[in-house]
Image (cartoon, grey):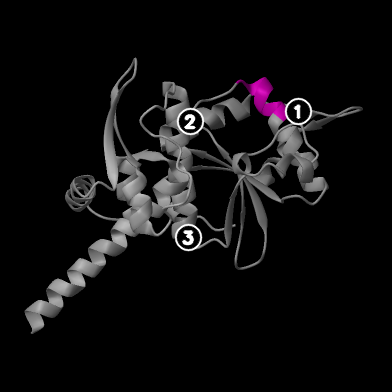
Amino acid sequence: MTHLMHISHAVRRGQDKERIVLRFLALETFTDFETLCFLLQSAKSNTSTLLKRMVAKGFLIKRTVMLSSRKVNLWGIVDDGAIFLGEGDTFLRSFKGLRFSPNTLDQKLLFQRTSIAFSHLSWATFHQSNYDSDFRKRYSLNHYPDALVTSKHNGETLAIEVESRLKSPVRYRIIIKEHILAKQQGFWSHVVFVVRDLEYKKMLRHRFNHIDYIPFDESRQPFYCHEPMISILSLEEMSSFTP
């Protein structure tokens, strides 16, 4: 009896993980192996076994994408996966026909891992700006962050910038100006630039070090006056992030 209970528990646990993967992919269309390991917080061997089972069941398809610089394995949800999830009538963007550049793929995967990191930290909301058609109507700005997050502890709203590719200091000067204006209007109080690793963090910090001032219509404000409202975090550092 104990052995049967153990098997039943293992089956339920496996189905729960399948649903976690399917819910994620129903929103994101596709992702890679490392992101799924991060989502499930499981070892590579366990994640690999789970994905093979889900592909065999017809819930997912695996696709190998050849990019100019590398080969990437991606997994996407299909109709049978949506039916198992209980969302068979939900429109699913076709994974098979998707085309993307290396830059687009890198940005999407880093954004996915960023949203997962905030989910693991139990933030109240993670609001993606590109999924909200009214976002630009609510915030009268010339630049929009990738997402907004709200702390469940104090209700503070933060803007999230996902940086898979570095921009010029001139471009960052313009972006930071918009975040300052957003703070002045009470839209959000802080901005977090998320990068993939500590080396990239150093590179972004170096770009920021070349920003002497932020230009406004009738003044130039020293950048250091506004630096406290900016954080740069690697994905690894996200695990201990608090506002």
| Residue under the point 43% across and 48% down | 26
Vertical placement of residue 183 versus 162, above or below: below
Write the residue at 37% across / 39% down. Answer: 31
> Residue at (48%, 40%) from the top-left corner?
111
Horizontally, residue 165 falls left or right of residue 213, namely left
| Magenta span of residues | 168-174
Q: Amino acid at mark 2?
A: Ser
Task: Please state if 162 lies on the left or on the right of 230 as rendered.
Answer: left
The quarter of the picture where the C terminus appears is bottom right
Q: Which residue corresponds to mark 2?
A: 164
Q: Give the number of the mark in front: 1 or 3.
A: 3
Residue 11 percent location from the top left of the image:
19, 67
Q: Nearer the viewer, residue 178 or 2?
A: 2
Percent x, y of residue 50: 21, 52
Q: Is residue 173 magenta?
A: yes
Closer to the N terminus: mark 2 or mark 1? Answer: 2
